Amino acid sequence: MPSQQETPVKSIVVPFEPDTSPALLRRLGHHEVPERWHTVDRSAHAPHLVAVPGDDGEDWAAAALVTARPHTAYLKIVDAVGDVPAAVAAVVAHARSRRLAQVKWEGWTANPEDAAAAGFAPLGPPLTQPEGAAGPAAGYVRWLSDGPVAEPPYYGQTTHFTCGAVTALVAQAHAGTLPWEALDRRAELTLWRDATNFLACEPVGLGVAVRRTWPSSSVTVHLDTDRPVLLDHLAENEQEWRALLQRTSRTDAERIGVPIDAGHLSMTAIRDAIGRREHVLLLLSLAGMQGFDVPHWVLCHGVVPGAVVVEDPWANAATGDTWVDAHLLPVPDPSLDTMSALSPDRFRGAVTIGRP
């Protein structure tokens, strides 16, 4: 339901498809549609137009191109054209009708004044953008639930394999343990080198590396299997020496006092940890959000009704995905529960970092 300050907006929601959308967009008359709407295949992110009819009921007074990652709890405005305030209000109403947690707005053409007038707050500019993903310099967010979520710095991983290291660095910067200005590629690669199982970071190795780097931080590894993980795609001879390294990481964990919790980490436990102002580095599959079953680390750092807010250090430029999608990303609890149960035996891996 709209708030008392909002007037219900009459709108039309139609799929955005390259073959049919040009005819629909001609209803905008003299309003120019950005070329970027057609430069990438956004079909994996359910692109649609939210349009506001004109007074004559025939032409459109405004429209917004809207997308979102699958299995998430937000909508993203790529651009709004025509009567921009009306288009944005229509998208917010559309998101409320779907009981979503958030609307984001990419800053390609949005200006701070329009965003503020529509109730959006500026996102902190990214320290780096994910490798190969050229997103806008600015972005905006409007939370649809009570109270904003504290914003960590956004740092996009600069390689295809350093997601685990990046999530740990961002967690420590968010906690105040690491200065924001120390978040750079040298720190990213240094922590990855200490944590890697070549090329991935498995949970125990990552937890040990975090404790070595920040000895005063409380670190717990959660891994509900005792077998080596993230190796099934490799040939047997490649698995053998990596498995040996994982056993060595377990020995190191015992030696330096990093506990390994063999129980299954539930969504309730993740929410409880965040409520204690801990950070949860969570291993998940990108199959649900990106369409390919690749293990990937994200940082869980906030909660809203029905969803956990994560930082994803990677974005898929091929689908129009940018840092604006990946930053302050709300994922419904059931979706995150499914994403973080990794094959083949549905194990869950995580590292919780407490305050010093």
Image (cartoon, helix red, strand yellow):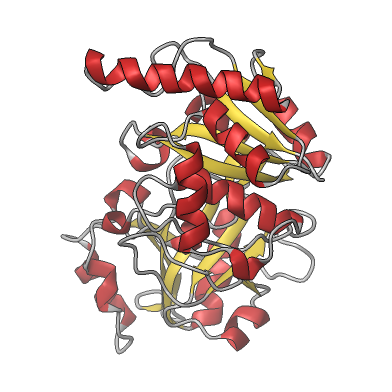
| Side of 267 relative to 311 (left or right) | right
| Side of 273 relative to 27 (left or right) | right
Q: Locate the C terminus and report the quarter of the image it occupies.
A: top right
- Spot occupied by residue 242 in the image (x, y as percentages of width and height): 37, 22
Is residue 175 shown above or below 153?
above
| Side of 343 relative to 304 (left or right) | left
- Viewer-closest of 213 and 356: 213
Going 30% across and 62% down the picture, which residue do you hit?
Answer: 132
Q: Is residue 232 visible?
A: no
Q: How many marks?
A: 0
- Spot occupied by residue 261 in the image (x, y as percentages of width and height): 68, 17
- Viewer-closest of 141 and 344: 344
Going 50% across and 73% down the picture, which residue do you hit?
Answer: 87
Is residue 153 shown above or below 111?
above
Q: Is residue 39 visible?
A: yes
Going 51% across and 76% down the picture, which residue do you hit?
Answer: 138
| Side of 226 relative to 291 (left or right) | right
Name, please, the residue furthest toward the front. 255
Which of the 4 image quadrants contains residue 230?
A: top left
- Spot occupied by residue 278 in the image (x, y as percentages of width and height): 76, 41
Q: Locate the N terminus and report the quarter of the image it occupies.
A: bottom right
- Spot occupied by residue 145 in the image (x, y as percentages of width and height): 73, 53
Going 55% across and 33% down the picture, which residue do you hit?
Answer: 336
Name, please, the residue furthest toward the left. 19
Is residue 17 shown above or below 212?
below
- Viewer-closest of 127 and 18: 127
